[in-house]
């Protein structure tokens, strides 16, 4: 029997049916998980009884149904209720069962909460959330304009608290710095976010600072670094950033002992900008021989090859590499496992990739304060997916001043022979 194309899954009715099936499946799975959680809680205290021999922890029907916004859409949940008659000896109050799966205050899943600041940062106004997400999620519950406004105020308060926190108990060994530009709907100038992400002594990545700067100026960066120092921040061992930043002038003033590493991602773009497009493929390969060399000695040899190949015709392109050579090759003096992390500002670039792409076609947040808060929530969400640097145990050795040659730890640096010839790149 032939199949009627009009009845295929591509029709709106079939698509709606699929959504219903997915939501019903999610509802049943959530109900089963909540039931199992309650059963386990009751079973754990089954032996606790009152003077009459009756259990102190028992089932007590169900709570009122409520809609929970999930990535599968809006799901109606009826959570089981627990009657816990036990008394807390410290407080004298009744103990209460609190679900770890579905807290009493929850009206949306964490994934939905993460989406809201991202959409707001990309230009969706608070009044548009109901229309934009209500149909997609199957419900507008929890998405009113007033709710979104309250959320933005909460995010602003969280960002202010973060900006004032004490840094004396944290040691950032490596530091990435970059400036991110975001359009502001109600203002002529873009918001310039000054972002610093650090690596703790245990190898974990963490947002260090996020501030509103003015065109990445040296004074804006200096204000931010001074504030971090005032709150107890130690000088990082190595800082990574774009060569065009005013960050370097500020760093030399506030933390002069910190070494500089220029971002190869930005440097390659600058070098290619000084070369004709026909030369780009070969130039990229030649530059890769520098930043991806076996060690610093081979990198210097690759620099010499690059200068010999392009110096006669394109001296400006070669100068962009040779003039910043110390800063471009600084990462070779650290553990080889860390090189992949230290060559670029990728931790910041990857976090803000979507913002960089979208700010050209959206109007952006309505104010600078809102833009700063939204960016803070975006990084907070991304932070959950950050992984520690490779060989995290070596970060503490870097802070201790250990010497690394060819990416390997040298126990007796005074006995180590010279491993490079600076004249190669002269």
Image (tube, grey):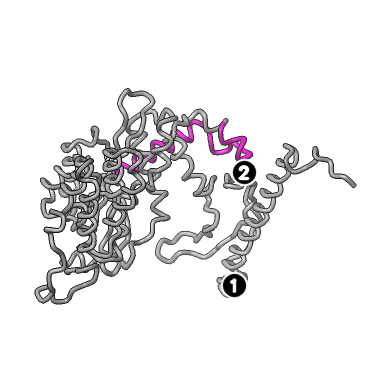
Q: Is residue 3 magenta?
A: no
Residue 100 in the image, given as x and y percentages of width and height? 52, 58
Identify the residue under disc 1: 46
* Mark 1, secondary structure of its residue: loop
Numbered mark located on residue 74 in the image: 2
Highlighted range, magenta: 132-161
Label 1 crowd bin: few (<14), some (14–19), many (20+), radius 10 Å: some
Do we see residue 395 in this rendering? no
* Mark 2, secondary structure of its residue: strand
Instruction: Please name the predominant secondary structure of the magenta segment in the image.
Output: helix
1 and 2 marks in contact (CB < 8 Å) = no
Q: Is residue 150 magenta?
A: yes
Residue 39 in the image, given as x and y percentages of width and height? 62, 66
Instruction: Give the side of residue 124 with respect to residue 412, left or right.
Output: right
Label 2 crowd bin: few (<14), some (14–19), many (20+), radius 10 Å: many
| Residue 160: quarter of image | top left
Instruction: Give the side of residue 165 with respect to residue 145, left or right.
Output: left
Residue 117 in the image, given as x and y percentages of width and height? 44, 39
């Amino acid at each position: 029997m032939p199949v009627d194309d009009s009845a295929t899954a591509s029709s709106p009715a079939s698509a709606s049916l699929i959504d219903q099936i997915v939501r019903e499946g999610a509802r049943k799975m959530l109900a089963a998980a909540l039931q199992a959680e309650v059963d386990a809680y009751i079973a754990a205290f089954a032996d606790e009884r009152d003077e009459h021999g009756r259990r102190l922890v028992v089932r007590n029907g169900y709570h009122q149904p409520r809609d929970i916004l999930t990535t599968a859409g809006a799901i109606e949940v009826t959570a089981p209720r627990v009657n816990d008659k036990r008394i807390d000896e410290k407080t004298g109050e009744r103990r209460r069962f609190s679900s770890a799966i579905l807290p009493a205050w929850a009206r949306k899943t964490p994934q939905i909460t993460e989406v809201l600041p991202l959409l707001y940062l990309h230009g969706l106004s608070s009044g548009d959330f109901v229309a934009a997400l209500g149909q997609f999620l199957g419900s507008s519950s929890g998405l009113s304009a007033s709710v979104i406004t309250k959320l933005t105020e909460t995010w602003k308060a969280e960002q202010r608290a973060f900006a004032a926190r004490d840094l004396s108990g944290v040691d950032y060994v490596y530091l990435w710095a970059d400036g991110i530009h975001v359009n502001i709907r109600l203002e002529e100038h873009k918001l310039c976010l000054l972002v610093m992400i650090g690596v703790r002594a245990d190898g974990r990545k963490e947002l260090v600072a996020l501030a509103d700067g003015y065109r990445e100026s040296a004074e804006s960066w200096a204000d931010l670094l001074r504030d971090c120092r005032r709150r107890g921040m130690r000088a990082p061992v190595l800082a990574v950033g774009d060569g065009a930043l005013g960050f370097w002038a500020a760093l030399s003033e506030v933390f002069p002992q910190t070494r500089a590493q220029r971002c190869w991602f930005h440097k390659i773009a600058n070098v290619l900008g000084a070369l004709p497009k026909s030369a780009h493929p070969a130039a990229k390969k030649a530059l890769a021989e520098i930043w991806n060399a076996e060690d610093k000695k081979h990198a210097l040899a690759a620099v010499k090859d690059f200068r010999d190949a392009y110096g006669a015709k394109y001296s400006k392109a070669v100068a962009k590499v040779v003039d910043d050579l110390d800063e471009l090759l600084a990462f070779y003096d650290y553990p080889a496992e860390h090189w992949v992390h230290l060559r670029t500002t990728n931790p910041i670039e990857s976090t803000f990739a979507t913002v960089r792409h979208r700010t050209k076609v959206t109007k952006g947040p309505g104010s600078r304060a809102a833009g700063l808060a939204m960016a803070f929530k975006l990084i907070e969400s991304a932070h959950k997916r950050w992984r520690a640097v490779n060989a995290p145990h070596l970060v503490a050795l870097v802070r201790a001043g250990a010497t690394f040659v060819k990416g390997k730890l040298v126990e007796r640096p005074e006995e180590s022979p010279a491993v490079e010839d600076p004249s190669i790149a002269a």
